[in-house]
Amino acid sequence: STLKMMLTADCVDWPVVLEQPGDPLEGKDFSFGGGACVIPRYLYNHFPNIDITTVEIDGSIIQLAEKYFELQQDARFRVVQCDALKFIFEAAQKAIQYEVIIFDVNGGEDGSPSPPNIFVSKDFIGRLQKCLSPDGILIYHMINREPPPVFQDIFNPIYIHNKEIVTVLYCRN
């Protein structure tokens, strides 16, 4: 069966098509860049069999999400305050795998490409790939940036969705 979802966050349309042989979105989902946790909370509220870990580097952002956006954590939904580089490095070393990884890390506010260059390096993307289950999906959000060739070198197939300055990559392991 095919599950089709349209997620909207930060004025960006996130069309997502996930093919699942069993129950839709069972297993572990992982997202970088919590912010208000719009996408993880949507998944949490609509898919009761999903286990979500979100990483956000800024503790004050987590506090704002709890206070103003009703972010509540429990056994199925956790927000970890940590640097994304450190988190993915440790997860890859421990061979922790996720069915879906949503990467939505923003860079500076000055119109520079987002995410920062370190997050599109071959080393980092390779570590993300190691953290995906064999049929896992990586959803990768970029602003003012063309997709680097490393994505096509590591993933097949890859789908690119462009809308103005926003690019979202959908990669299958």
Image: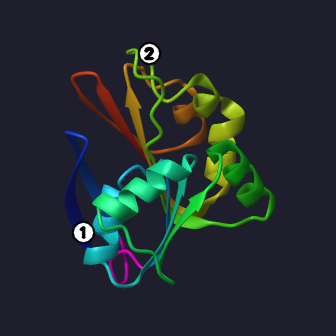
Residue that numbered label 2 is attached to? 112
Q: Which residue does the image show at 27% across and 54% down from the upper left?
A: 16
Secondary structure under tag 1 reads: strand
Residue 36 horizontal/vertical position (percent): 35, 53
* Residue 104 relative to residue 6: left or right: right
Which numbered disc, 1 or 2, marks the residue closer to the eye? 2
Give the vertical position of 94 relative to 108 (above or below).
below
Q: Nearer the viewer, residue 47 or 136?
A: 47
Read off the magenta span.
20-26
Q: Chief secondary structure of the magenta span?
A: loop
Residue 44 horizontal/vertical position (percent): 34, 74
Give the vertical position of 27 relative to 18 (above or below).
below
Q: Amino acid at mark 2?
A: Ser
Q: Which residue does the image show at 42% across and 20% down from the upper left?
A: 146
Magenta stretch encompasses residue 70: no
Q: Which residue does the image show at 58% across and 62% down from the upper left?
A: 80
Residue 156 horizontal/vertical position (percent): 50, 44
Q: CA distance from mark 1 to mark 2?
A: 34 Å
* Residue 74 relative to residue 111: left or right: right
Q: Amino acid at mark 1?
A: Leu
* Residue 135 relative to residue 21: left or right: right
Residue that numbered label 1 is attached to? 3
